Amino acid sequence: MRRRFKRASALFGQTPARNDYLALIGGTIYVSPTEEPIRNGVVLINSGKIAAVGTRGQVQVPQNAQLVDCSGRTITAGFWNSHVHFMERKWADVASIPASELNQQLQDMFTRYGFTAAFDLSSPWENTRRLRDRIESGEVVGPRIYSTGLGLLPANPGLPPDAVINLMGWMKAPAPEVADAAQAAAAARRLLDAGVDGIKLFVAAPSKASLSQSTIEAAVHEAHRLGKPVFVHPNTGADVLTAVRGGVDVIAHTTPQSGPWDETLLATMKEHRVALIPTLWIWKWYARHDRRSAQDKIVNTEVGQLRAWAANGGTVLFGTDLGAVDPDPAEEYSLMGQAGMTFRQILASLTTSPAERFGESKQRGRVAEGFQADLVVLNDDPSKNIRALIAVQYTLRAGKIIYRTGE
Ligand SMILES: [Zn+2]
């Protein structure tokens, strides 16, 4: 190719004009987790979408296209983090935060690690909606945000005192408490009427109060009427079983505190086709003050739970509980690898599996013609070392470079 590559830094943050083409040239492209990668490939982008994907010989790059050299790099679809929270104080009163500061905060947590979509599983909905609006208007650069609004709690949950909430760094935002099925249905309906993308249930609370199966069913019924998913935070395997029987769609954590998951639980999860967000790193992090043997027990149990589920063909969605844990996802990738998940399985948890679960599989999750140009360009090959998933060179959303490492 004789034309000179334009420095990607010159393209940073630009919204390409309507007829402009952007071409990522020369990388190894994982078009999906199940297909063979295209080596020395080209991704041609136009109007925010993928116009063509193939080898250099197959894709005609228009003369006026801007070119980005991706040789030696790996290209995948943009990543999803399916368990985050916009609950930290840094997001409070989001309408008043200057765009430059928001950009930095969103980069620190999302775009620098390749996340182009995030599902928030409990935060004050009006605030999170304003954040999303500022991103979608183009004023602020960030991922596509989905949110459940504040999660539903059992009555008398015994939440920590304000001093502890302060120490955790969270906003004070009282979540709705529901005592029975009628209250759960009403609370879910209020959130859905306000426009949330799903419902989150805390099946058990610190006080040991819990939601009954019929209470869970009532909330699920309201969400499913609108085709929206229900997520559950469980503390034990028994909580998972109740929630699955109640019809929830996504289990938002493993439960290492309650010991290994038995065959009945795993079979019931499979039968109900739920998805699991493992959040392995946060349990390891929370155990860091405990004795080494106790830490090892937590890690072995959670890794065992994920291994049993993934080996059984269960759907896994990548998620870290971001907002409650350090943003760097490298440790989560490593722990998923310890549970026997291959690079391709982990890639599915970041791309195709969330896109399918959340009804976006016709436009997101794969590097394919006609799909949204939400892409990650990595400097290393994650099929050789899973930690290479954090070596992000560029993150693109709708064809726009929204993050690049200094070059
Ligand atoms: Zn969470």
Image (cartoon, rainbow, N blue to C red):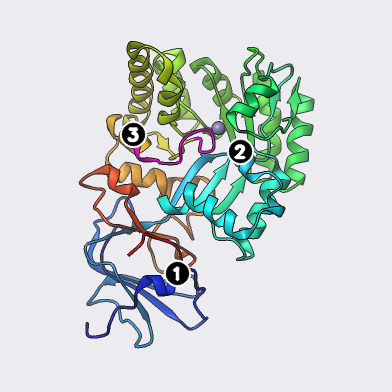
Q: Residue at x 26, y 76 (%)?
A: 58
Quadrant of the image containing the C terminus: bottom left
Residue 238 can be seen, yes or no: yes
Q: Is the shortest distance between ligand 1 and the CB of mark 2 under 8 Å?
A: no
Q: Which residues are magenta?
A: 321-330
Dot 1 amino acid type:
Phe
Q: Residue at x 39, y 70 (%)?
A: 9
Name the secondary structure under disc 2. loop
- Callout 2–callout 1 Cβ contact below 8 Å: no
Report x, y in % for residue 348.
37, 46
Residue to which mark 2 is pinned: 88
Camera-nearest residue between 158 and 90 = 90
Query: Quarter for ligand 1?
Result: top right
Give the CA separation, mark 2 to mark 1. Answer: 28 Å
- Which residue is under mark 1? 12
Disc nearer the start of the sequence (3/2): 2
